[in-house]
Image: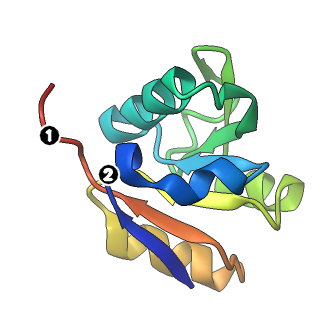
Amino acid sequence: MMEYIGTVECDYGLEKEEQIIIYGAGKVGRHALEVLKRAGWQNKVACFCDSNKDMAGKAIDGVAIRGIEEAYAMYPTGTYLVASMCVRQMVETLLQYGIGKIHIIRESPAE
């Protein structure tokens, strides 16, 4: 179920979440991590997940990148932030896993 669509800066529902998984380790995902760190929520970010198998096992600013299967196995009740331009495909993948908390993060306006 979609719980939020918009920029990460305005996603106030994340404050109550304990496990945030950023789905997409590209530009939008990296920006989401920066915003969450500025808000003091870096400890809530469990990992990135990405469908690019070459990214698995790497990290961004100390946050591990996992494949979707591994992320779901570790954090089945986490809140997944879809942070990419491939929103439809990513949401469909999350729904196939039965993930219930999905937030779609759009690219923020230039600062």
x then y, percent, for residue 60:
56, 20
User: For the residue labelled by badge 2, is the local secondary structure a helix, a strand or a loop?
Assistant: loop
Residue beneath the point at 37% across and 36% down: 26
The answer to whether the residues at label 1 and label 2 have Cβ atoms under 8 Å apart is yes
Instruction: Kindly report the distance in space between the C-alpha atoms of the residues bearing marks 1 and 2.
Output: 9 Å
Q: Amino acid at mark 2?
A: Thr
Quarter holding residue 63: top right
Task: Decide if residue 55 is on the left or right side of residue 107.
Answer: right
Q: Residue at x 55, y 23 (%)?
A: 37
Mark 1 neighbour class, 10 Å CA radius: few under 14, some 14 to 19, many 20 or more: few
Tell which of 10 and 7 is nearer to you: 10
Nearer to me, 29 or 15? 15
Residue drawn 55% across and 74% down? Answer: 93
Residue type for callout 1: Pro
Residue denoted by label 2: 7
- Residue 12 screen position, x and y as percent: 50, 54
Q: Earlier in the sequence, mark 1 or mark 2?
A: 2
